[in-house]
Amino acid sequence: MALAAQEKPALQQDYGLSDEEDLSEEQIQELLKQAEARLRERAVSKSRPQNATTSLPKLSTGTLEAPYVKVEKNIARVDGSRLLDPNLRALSNQVRKVEEPVRQKQKQAEEKKATAGPDWFGLPRLDPTPELKQDIKLIQMRSVLDPHRHYRKEGKAQMPEYAQVGTLIEGPTEFYSARIQKKDRKKTFVEEVLAAESENGRFKRKYDEVQTAKTSGKKAYYKALKAKRSKKG
């Protein structure tokens, strides 16, 4: 009702009516048709999508490279300096070193034999040192070290082609529960065998037994026997 009261003076001015006169039925119908038409126009304008191109920013193409082909006097000419990269052109001007196929194959074979391959995590070829050779030989003769311990096969340990020597790092509890004291530990197997020999003297005793058996019945054997008898007499 308030809206109708506000629009009433405007309608009276449009149709030339005074304050005391009212609108006729035909005028009211005409006004309703006009209002419906305005509502339809507003609904259509809202349903129409806005032009998206007006809201997008303009794309900058940046600086484009100059074309390789130029037209000079109605003739297409190619810029030869731009057909090849300058670094590649500099390499082409250098002297190329060509290796012989035989040497190249030998080099590839040596590189392939340098390691055991990716399946073995690139294990390098073993360069045995004198200490390592002594340890391997000692492992082959391990049955002599302890007569009470028997092994299935003798001399099975061979020098491996691919191997790597490492160092065992003791844990934090090794200081309290170590089987061997630090002062008694040796760096190689040979040092351990010599240290054990100095304690029990087994090798020296066996050596004397072998020498006694070898010299039995010889002249030196009888001389030693006579010397023992003379000492007793």
Image (cartoon, rainbow, N blue to C red):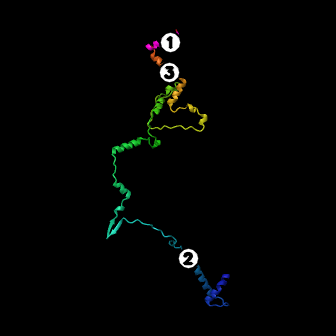
In the rendered image, which residue does mark 2 sit on?
A: 45
Q: How far apart are marks 1 and 2 (CA)?
A: 138 Å
Helix, strand or loop at label 2? It is helix
Q: Which of 36 and 82 is in front in this view?
A: 82
Q: Is mark 3 on a helix, strand or loop?
A: helix
Which residue, given by chain and number where applicable, does mark 1 sit on? Answer: 228
Relative to 145, is 100 above or below?
below
Tell me what residue is drawn at x 62 percent, y 89 percent. Answer: 13
Work out how far the residue at label 1 is from the one at label 3, CA to CA, in angstroms. 21 Å
Q: Nearer the viewer, residue 127 or 110?
A: 127
Using the image, tell me which numbered label, if any, was put on residue 206.
3
Along the line of sight, the residue nearer the viewer: 95 or 8 = 95
Element at badge 1?
helix
- Image quadrant of residue 92? bottom left
Q: Earlier in the sequence, mark 3 or mark 2?
A: 2
- Marks 3 and 2, how far apart at CA: 117 Å
Q: What is the magenta range? A: 218-232
Residue density around tag 2, few if under 14, some if 14–19, many if 20 or more, within 10 Å:
few
Which one is closest to the eye, mark 1 or mark 3? 1
Q: Is residue 229 magenta?
A: yes
User: Among all residues in the image, which is located at the extreme top?
Assistant: 233
The x, y position of residue 156, in whole percent, is 46, 31
